[in-house]
Image: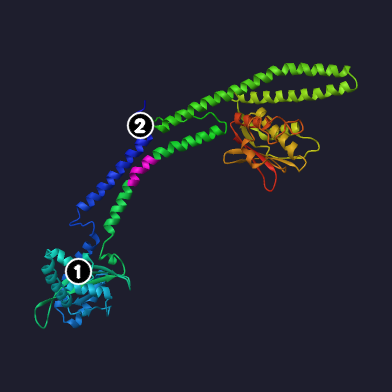
Amino acid sequence: MRKPTSTLFTKILSWFFLNLLLVVAALTLFFAFQPQVDLHDFFGQQGSDRLRAAGMLIAHDLNQTQPEGWAEILARHGAIHGVDFALVLQDGVIFSPTLKTLPKEVMLRSQDALGHKGRREIMRQLLQKKTAINKKCPSEVEKDCAKSLLLPKRYARRTRLIMRSKEPTRYWFGAKIPLLSHAEHRPKPGLLLASSDSITGNGFFFDPLPWMVVAASVLLISVLLWIPLVRNITKPLVRMTRAAEEIAKGNFNVSIHEPRADEIGRLARTINNMTARLADFVKGQKRFLGDVAHELGSPVARIQFGLGVLEQRLEGGNQERVRDVMEDVDEMSKLIRELLAFSRAEMHSSAVELEQILLLPVVEAAVRREGTPAMQIDVKVDPELSALASADLLTRALANVLRNAVKYAGETGPILVAAQEKDGQVILTVKDSGPGVAEEYLDRLFDPFFRPEPSRDRDSGGVGLGMAIVKTCVAACQGTVSARNREPKGFAVTIRLGC
């Protein structure tokens, strides 16, 4: 029984909760070290604090200057902070280096923040009236008064101005600053407004850098945590995928080593067991075919001999019937020879001794075996080109390929056999100009007993072992074979061998 902690699901779940815990811890530490952080109003608090600090310097400069020079002071400080400053007095006078008037909603809010006399008188009367009639507490009466004045409740006790105007769209922050009256020599309130078309006010309202640092840190932590886990999962899956592709090609000499206790380790061991059983099954099947073909060889030979003797003693129609039977027996004998060739090539592939051989003599031997005087087979092979293979097996493989080319494309043009060395391999190609093979059959072309044609009579060809023998012989030479259709027409078989 496997441990619960060794399952892949448990590992992924544990890493997920660990990542989540670290993200929460990072956010908690960030806000814990920020003074007076209000998560619901953090942006406004930061902008207001900066505006109050700048307002102290601006108020000092304004108090040292006549009102005629206030616009220039506001312009100078605006250039320093990257925003547009404006000053609104209690009597509605506006000082601004860029704006002659303020948006209506901004002006209304500015008067409320400064305690406009008209609004203040209305508020006082309503307070007295509602307190006398309803006997409410002052806080409740204040909320009702704000509603009566068509102001949102959230503005009834707001100590700072934060808003956005629509036409044009700008963001506004306001804070009171003390100003000295040069005529009366006593302080009077003024509202310092900072506006910008950017929500951050070019960094004056809100500095996004700390948040960017936090987001980057969280992302980096997540990447550092999850990448090792993902790689730990995907790498063995890639190796197992490659092994499965080799098994699908008929190569059972693959083994996956994954010393793990989770699902991936169990999958690797299952694939290894499956590969071993498939190899034994295929080997036993081919041994059975070889044994059957070998046992049938002698009886079929005796039947052929007996039919030959019988044919000589019969006359007329009986002799013709014997000839038909002899043709069937010849087809049976041909099938037995193909089965024996296929079985022997597979069973003795591990005992094949490879050597460096010249390709041209091998190609010429295959051409002599399958070519005819009426068939044109062109050979383009360098006499000095050699490959690591078995001469007998390679000759048999080439002969089978040429036999198919002669049969299916012999009347459409010459057949070309060419070889070249490329990227440390010897590439041997047989090309023809025939009709080719349907694309859906290319992957199965080298399977035993597979034939693209549905019929199996003697006119349509052999029994479907020719290309399977080619693959077995080439594999015994530690090479690979593939087939493809040519454009616009034709067929090509490529054999790759070691140098």
Q: Determine which quarter of the picture holds residue 71.
A: bottom left
x and y, in percent, of residue 324 in the image: 82, 24
Q: Residue at x 9, y 78 (%)?
A: 186
Query: Which quadrant of the figure contains the C terminus?
Result: top right
* Magenta stretch contains residue 296: no
Label 1 sits on what residue type? Answer: Ala
> What span is colored magenta in the figure?
222-230
Image side of residue 29 versus residue 332, left or right: left
| Badge 2 or badge 1: first in the primary sequence | 2
Q: Which residue is mark 1?
A: 146
Residue 325 position (above or below residue 127): above
The answer to whether residue 428 shows anywhere in this view is no
State the residue at coordinates (51%, 34%): 244
Is any part of residue 476 visible from this angle? yes
Picture layout, residue 270 above or below residue 92? above
| Residue that lies at the very extreme toward the front in this rendered image | 133
Main SS of residues in magenta: helix
x, y (%) of residue 455? 72, 33
Name the amino acid type tagged 2.
Answer: Ser
Percent from the top left, x then y, of residue 202?
A: 29, 66
- Give the residue furthest to the left: 185
Residue denoted by label 2: 6
Give the residue drawn at x 72%, y 37%.
405
How many residues crowd mark 1 within 10 Å: few (<14), some (14–19), many (20+)? Answer: some
Which residue is nearer to you in this view: 385 or 42? Answer: 42
Label 2: few (<14), some (14–19) or many (≥20) C-alpha neighbours in 10 Å? few
The residues tagged by marks 2 and 1 sit, at their Cα atoms, a distance apart of: 64 Å
